[in-house]
């Protein structure tokens, strides 16, 4: 029985993962902007940078210039769409349970991490660098968002955040090295990243902390 992902070209699989992640992270980022009491323009800026900041950094590092977020209008349009959806329903956003925002963030993290690792492999970087690019894609936009919102970036204090992105990227890269179909490799990595992140939130898992003085 053929794999369903084989019906699509590799570039189409990557595009689907990338655009879906863009929408999810834009929704989560713009929600954070609303809860921080930003104006309409500020919310759209946060939506855009949350969704596309990590991908822009990744593309610059691997030499994919100009970055997709600038070259392909669909990325910016979907990021702003996510921000627009939040603005239209901003009263509802203010009552959104925190757990739902965490779930959206985890889903976006997972999809971006595997898409970033896959694109890095496509550009011929080493497996280790591809894993790091996956984590950069997943976490980069959130870091910029948190800095703009005057918060400590989540990757510096959230339990198993960057670690989950690294795990998802590792699974994707290893699966690709073993010639698993591209879509399945990315799906496996995304499931691992999402599951690890949500279990860490649910059960309070964390990495060891350095004792303060």
Image (cartoon, grey):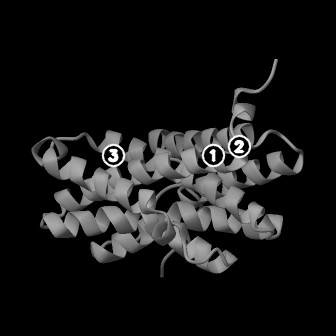
Q: Nearer the viewer, mark 3 or mark 1?
A: 1
- What element does badge 3 sit on? helix
- What element does badge 2 sit on? loop
Residue 33, located in which quarter of the rendered image?
A: bottom left
Relative to residue 128, is residue 166 drawn left or right? Answer: left
- Say which of 47 and 105 sits in front: 47
Relative to residue 19, is residue 151 drawn left or right? Answer: left
Residue 137, located in which quarter of the rendered image?
A: bottom right
Name the residue rendered at 53%, 46% in the picture. 197
Task: Tell me, yes or no, whether the two marked residues, 1 and 2, touch with CB atoms within 8 Å.
Answer: yes
Residue furthest bottom as drawn: 213
Nearest to N terminus: mark 3 or mark 1: 1
Q: Position of residue 135 (x, y in %)?
A: 61, 63
Nearest to N terminus: mark 2 or mark 3: 2
Q: Position of residue 168 (x, y in %)?
A: 66, 50
In the rendering, which numbered label is found on residue 138? none
Name the residue rendered at 58%, 68% in the picture. 136
- What element does badge 1 sit on? helix
Q: Nearer the viewer, mark 2 or mark 3?
A: 2
In the rendering, which numbered label is found on residue 12? 1
Residue carrying label 2: 9
Residue 190, located in which quarter of the rendered image?
A: top right
Residue carrying label 3: 101
């Amino acid at each position: 029985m053929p794999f369903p992902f084989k019906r699509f070209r590799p570039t189409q699989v990557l595009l689907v993962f990338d655009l879906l992640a863009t929408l999810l992270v834009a929704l989560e980022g713009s929600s954070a902007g609303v809860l921080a009491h930003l104006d309409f323009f500020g919310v759209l800026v946060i939506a855009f940078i949350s969704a596309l900041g990590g991908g822009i950094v990744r593309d610059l590092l691997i030499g994919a210039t100009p970055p997709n977020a600038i070259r392909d209008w669909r990325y910016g349009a979907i990021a702003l769409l996510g921000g627009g959806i939040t603005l239209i329903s901003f009263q509802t956003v203010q009552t959104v349970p925190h757990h739902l925002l965490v779930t959206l963030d985890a889903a976006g993290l997972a999809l971006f991490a595997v898409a970033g690792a896959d694109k890095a492999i496509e550009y011929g970087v080493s497996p280790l660098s591809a894993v790091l690019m996956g984590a950069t894609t997943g976490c980069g936009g959130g870091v910029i968002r948190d800095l703009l919102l005057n918060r400590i970036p989540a990757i510096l204090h959230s339990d198993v955040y960057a670690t989950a992105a690294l795990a998802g990227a590792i699974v994707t890269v290893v699966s690709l090295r073993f010639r698993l179909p591209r879509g399945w490799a990315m799906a496996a990595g995304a499931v691992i990243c999402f599951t690890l992140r949500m279990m860490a939130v649910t059960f309070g898992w964390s990495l060891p902390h350095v004792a303060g003085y």
